Amino acid sequence: MDDVVLIDHPLVQHKLTLLRRKDTSTNDFRRLLNEISTLMAYEVLHDIPMHPITIETPLETMTANVIDGKKVVFASILRAGTGIVDGMLTVVPGARVGHIGLYRDPKTLIAVEYYFKMPGDLAERDVVVVDPMLATGHSAVAAVERIKEYSPRSIKFVCLLTCPQGIEALHSAHPDVPIFTAAVDRELDENGYIVPGIGDAGDRIFGTT
Ligand SMILES: O=P(O)(O)OC[C@H]1O[C@H](OP(=O)(O)OP(=O)(O)O)[C@H](O)[C@@H]1O
Ligand SMILES: O=c1cc[nH]c(=O)[nH]1
Ligand SMILES: [Mg+2]
């Protein structure tokens, strides 16, 4: 699949298997998602810009590279994106965080926006849109469309799980946005849930029903 990066590292896959189980507690679900997100950040951010600085080691002066964490924006699709942002901030603590509030209308599955707040100067920043689930793709397509209004330097999309329909929808609407995921599941069920899946990501993270 073009422009889908499947993060199949054994540590990620092991934790994903534990997280999928229906008897995994809210506490463990949140912790596992946090850990997976930290591991995924390593792959997602493999090409962010670096610049050289001069430092003193105990032995001599040298030039070495650093990233500019402030130029990275984690854009969380509420609610469930929060579960990924926390893990990614562990490795890029200086990143900026944007929020886009969207919920799926349970009947039409259309994404409805209720909140939008991004950092300024997106033209100078690389945006990583995060949401555990890319199902019909309606939420991801709407979120990327809104963020593009501010012309960021680049956009990537990161999810925990997707399915062929979600990939197709996001790629047709935004072919320039690469997708990073830990799994591509079989399909959507009649209610628009990914199967085998993990159930409702927001409910499992926050312990709601
Ligand atoms: O690809 P889609 O078909 O749009 O589905 C994916 C969306 O559904 C879930 O959010 P939900 O609407 O349940 O909101 P929540 O995070 O507040 O629970 C999930 O976190 C995605 O945002
Ligand atoms: O399987 C799914 C699909 C959409 N949203 C979820 O939380 N889970
Ligand atoms: Mg939900």
Image (cartoon, grey):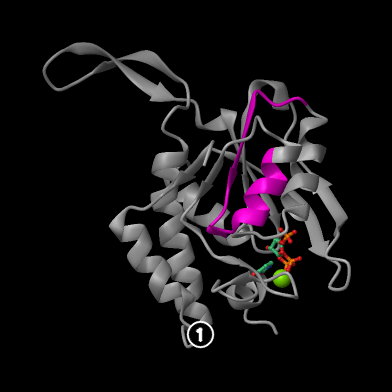
Location of residue 138 in the rendering, given as x and y in whole percent from the top left corner:
78, 54
Q: Residue at x 83, y 30 (%)?
A: 149
Residue 93 showing in the rendered view: no
Q: Is residue 123 left or right of residue 86?
A: right
Location of residue 13 in the rendering, given as x and y in whole percent from the top left corner:
36, 62
Q: Quadrant of residue 175?
A: top right
Q: Residue at x 49, y 26 (%)?
A: 68
Instruction: Determine if the magenta segment contains residue 154.
Output: yes
Location of residue 120 in the rendering, given as x and y in whole percent from the top left corner:
75, 30
Say few, some or many: other residues with alpha carbon within 10 Å of mark 1 (under 14 / 14 to 19 / 20 or more): few
Between 134 and 48, which is closer to the camera in this rendering?
134
**Helix, strand or loop status at disc 1:** loop
Q: Is residue 164 left or right of residue 5?
A: right
What span is colored magenta in the figure?
Answer: 151-171
Q: Which residue is mark 1?
A: 22
The C terminus sits in image quarter: bottom right
Residue 167 showing in the rendered view: yes
Instruction: Determine if the magenta segment contains residue 164.
Output: yes
Q: Is residue 166 left or right of residue 21?
A: right
Q: Residue at x 65, y 74 (%)?
A: 200
As drawn, 207 above or below 173: below
Q: Amino acid at mark 1?
A: Lys
